[in-house]
Image (cartoon, grey):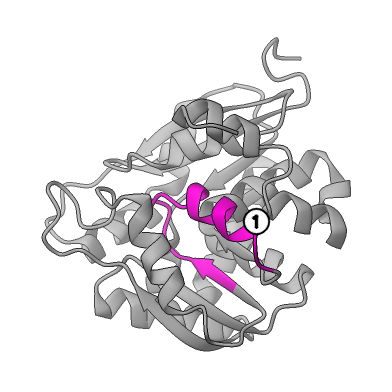
Amino acid sequence: MVEYAPKGLIGLLTPQANTTVEPEFFILMSPGYAFLNARLVSDKPTIEARLGDYFAGIAETADEFANAPIGAYTFACTGASYLEGRAREEDTVKRFEDTRGRPFITAGRAVADALHLLGATRIGLISPYPPSLTEASIGYWRSHGFDVAVVGNAFNAGSDFHPIYSLAANAASTALDQTAAEKVDATVMLGTGMPTLGPILAHAAHAERPVLSCMSALAWRALAVFDPALREFASARRYFAGEGWRERYHVFIGTPI
């Protein structure tokens, strides 16, 4: 047993310049769980090329954990799943799990699992991506059987160091407001680099339609490996609305609860 992870230790694979994954994953964890992080790296000049390198380097990056007692591995990079496609993603997951004997959870598949559990078929998307990657994401969600009814755009091509990772939470909030009139079963905030937890909590306080992000789904699915009760509809619905992590978010950010 690991002293600071008596309930479970999670291996987290994160894109190299991503400044959101680790803080949000920490906030979304439950007491008794911890994670180790390894950075997916690439020297390619474009987002699409880097995403391809991240996907190709999954096994090598996971080797950085050596013999740490990882109970589940997670891939915090949805863009790579969109470009590689559902079939290749599923094949990669199977080969990884067969080799290492532990669950391997991609953020894309975690979102799909969450939407299926919540009974959502008609969905809205909030995208921080350029148009080409947004289109790839729509194809990915359709391959999982979802009807994409509306897409809100939070992309900022003129950001200071990265068009996604430098976004503020209000970018997601604004795009969420723009799609509020559309009747959907759930809304998904795409990407693991756009800050999403504040908008999720603000929305949960006054609306019935669930809003989840790729990070909230990834953390939920990882915790569910160790706590099967989280796979129940009511428990999942409460988790996505902030149960178990709302207070930790406000403490972390330094805002009133």
In front of the other: 89 or 170 = 170
The magenta stretch spans residue 169: no
In front of the other: 104 or 7 = 7
The magenta stretch spans residue 201: yes
In front of the other: 131 or 57 = 131
Q: Position of residue 116 (x, y in %)?
A: 73, 73
Q: Quadrant of residue 15?
A: top left
The quarter of the image holding the C terminus is top right
Q: Is residue 34 above or below residue 121?
A: above
Res. 26 in view: no
Residue at left 46%, top 27%? 254
Indicate the secondary structure of the residue bearing disc 1: loop
Q: Position of residue 98 (x, y in %)?
A: 67, 51
Write the start and end of the magenta stretch as one range: 187-207
Residue at left 46%, top 34%? 23
In the drawing, does residue 88 fall left or right of residue 73?
left
Q: Is residue 171 above or below residue 61?
A: below
Instruction: Give the residue number, with chain letter if any, for mark 1.
Output: 205
Q: As shown in the figure, which amino acid type bears the numbered disc 1?
A: Ala
The quarter of the image holding the N terminus is top right
Q: Quadrant of residue 119?
A: bottom right
In the drawing, does residue 232 fall left or right of residue 215?
right
Residue at left 39%, top 42%? 20
